Amino acid sequence: MVPTITMSSPTLRVRRLAKSMDGSGQSVGISSDGRAYTWGRTNKLGQLGRRSGEKPSKKPHPAQFVDPDDPSRTVDNVKVVRAFAGGNEEAGHTAVLDSTGSLWLAGTDRWQQLGLCNAALGTIGYTWDGLWKEAFHRNTFVPKLLSDVCCDATIRDIAIGGDHTLVLSANKRDVIAFGKGGDGQLGLAGFKPWVSAPVRSKELSSRKGDIAAVCAINHCSLTLGNDGQVLSEAGKCSKRMSKRYAAALQYCQKRAERDGLVLDGGEKYQ
């Protein structure tokens, strides 16, 4: 069923819906014409991708996208096809993919979980360019890294954790991870950086079998196989079978089925 959401203006009919399962409480709805609408418990850290105070956070309103050529302006021609939301009670960030395959992120950036940086600038401590972004910013660093790693900048899947982000390449082998890494959630083979710019995850990437999708649950990172089952994990995943973690994993698996990334009732995956 396609959800219908009541706004202060006419009713919004959403064809895709993404919501945070980790406590930050934001949701993203994509309309039939590709516009992204956001709402949630709060927007104090920019996780709704729109300027704080302009509209009530609990009601759906259009997200805002910063003009890559002029950061002082916003653009309204971004057609969103997929959305991803996550965070925790103290933070939250959101990502979308547009019709051209470009990656946009908004929200908390104190651990560089938006990946808008340059690794050459260093990755110790908080990010150097503000603690959050109130509108969606296009990320050009992650696609370039994907291209350098596997010769293909196309993104297959994204997962938003408590304070980190995972990006799966279209080659179904390479996972890029960035953000907070102190619990090992970035999967850097024993290296647990306090904070990291985007980098290839050694533990989550695969040399043999295909990775169909990625999941992030608070400080735990997971990859899924073509059958939707867990392939690998990194970070603080010991509570994965608790009710909260099980519900979040099931939500991620259902999202992967909906997006055609894993097998669903005999249907072919991409």
Image: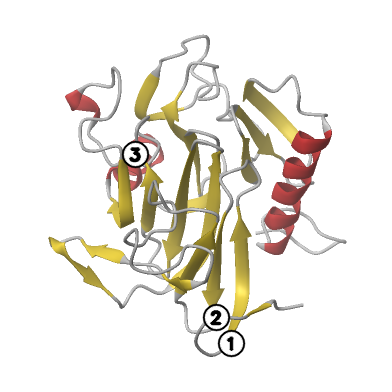
- Check disc 2 and report its element: helix, strand or loop: loop
Q: Amino acid at mark 3?
A: Gly
x and y, in percent, of residue 156 in the image: 53, 52
- Check disc 3 and report its element: helix, strand or loop: loop
User: Mark 3 to mark 2: distance in Å?
Assistant: 32 Å
Circles 1 and 2: CB distance less than 8 Å?
yes
Quadrant position of residue 1: bottom right
Residue 69's disc number: none
In front here: 261 or 219? 219
The residue singled out by tag 1 in the image is: 11
Residue 173 can be seen, yes or no? yes
- Residue drawn where x is 48% and y is 18% of the image: 188
Q: Amino acid at mark 2?
A: Met
- Residue drawn where x is 28% and y is 17% of the image: 124
- Residue drawn where x is 36% and y is 59% of the image: 102
In-image side of 97 versus 220 (left or right):
left
User: Closer to the N terminus: mark 3 or mark 2?
Assistant: 2
In front here: 72 or 89? 89
**Position above or below: 54 against 196:** below
The residue singled out by tag 3 in the image is: 115
Residue 7's disc number: 2
The total of numbered circles placed on residues is: 3
User: Closer to the N terminus: mark 3 or mark 1?
Assistant: 1
- Residue drawn where x is 39% and y is 46% of the image: 45
**Position above or below: 112 against 63:** above
Q: Amino acid at mark 1?
A: Thr
x and y, in percent, of residue 5 in the image: 63, 78
